Image (cartoon, rainbow, N blue to C red):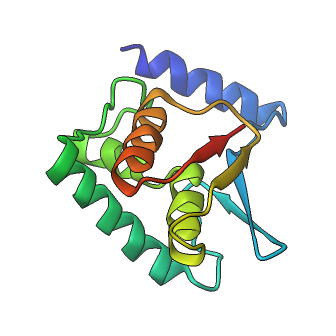
């Protein structure tokens, strides 16, 4: 790819004070809004959330053949780092928390400020299917 061009654009944006809005996802549980950003570690239940996310991801890999699709990760890093970046997306953290803190029959309603990436869309579909949960993402 054109990694040098991308770095130059990011440097120019930084120099002119332009910032990209971070991806955020919100999920409401028991009347309280829980907000997540990519690779978020600020939630009081961070450890449990990441453990649940790891458990869910392994189940999808084992039972549905899920493999992370890294073709749209636009960073010049190795493949494993790209997979880790995808696994830390805010909507996945919101889903993991929702699975932890809602009954098995409850619909997960997640709101995002940006579009969902194609890999997270696949992830959500597989979670819905394997866990028999309705997931509404908007």
On screen, residue 49 versus residue 45, left or right, reads left
- Depth check, front residue: 43 or 34: 34
Please indicate whether residue 2 sits to the left or right of residue 83 in the image. right
Residue 76 visible, this angle: yes
Q: Is residue 76 above or below residue 54?
A: above
Could you tell me if residue 39 is visible in this image?
no
Q: Position of residue 5 (x, y in %)?
A: 51, 16
Determine which quarter of the picture holds residue 72.
Answer: top left
Q: Where is residue 68? Give x, y as percent.
A: 29, 39
> Which quadrant is home to the C terminus?
top right
Residue extending furthest toward the front: 105
The x, y position of residue 98, in whole percent, is 58, 66
At 63% from the left and 29% from the top, the residue drawn is 10
- Residue 63 locus on image (x, y percent): 18, 50
Q: Is residue 54 above or below residue 114?
A: below
Residue appearing at x 59%, y 77% in the figure: 101
Picture quarter with the N terminus: top left
| Location of residue 119 by image quarter | top left
Residue at horizontal 65 percent and vertical 76 percent from the top: 42
Nearer the observer, 13 or 102: 102
């Amino acid at each position: 790819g054109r990694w040098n061009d991308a770095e130059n654009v990011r440097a120019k944006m930084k120099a002119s004070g332009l910032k990209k809005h971070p991806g955020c996802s919100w999920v409401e549980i028991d009347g309280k809004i829980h907000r997540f950003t990519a690779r978020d570690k600020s939630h009081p239940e961070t450890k449990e959330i990441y453990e649940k996310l790891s458990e869910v991801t392994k189940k999808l890999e084992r039972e549905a053949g899920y493999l992370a699709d890294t073709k749209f990760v636009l960073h010049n890093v190795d493949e494993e780092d790209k997979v880790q970046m995808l696994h830390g997306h805010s909507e996945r953290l919101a889903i993991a928390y929702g699975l932890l803190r809602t009954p098995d029959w409850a619909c997960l309603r997640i709101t995002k400020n940006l579009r969902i990436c194609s890999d997270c869309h696949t992830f959500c579909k597989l979670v819905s299917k394997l866990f028999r949960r309705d997931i509404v993402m908007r």
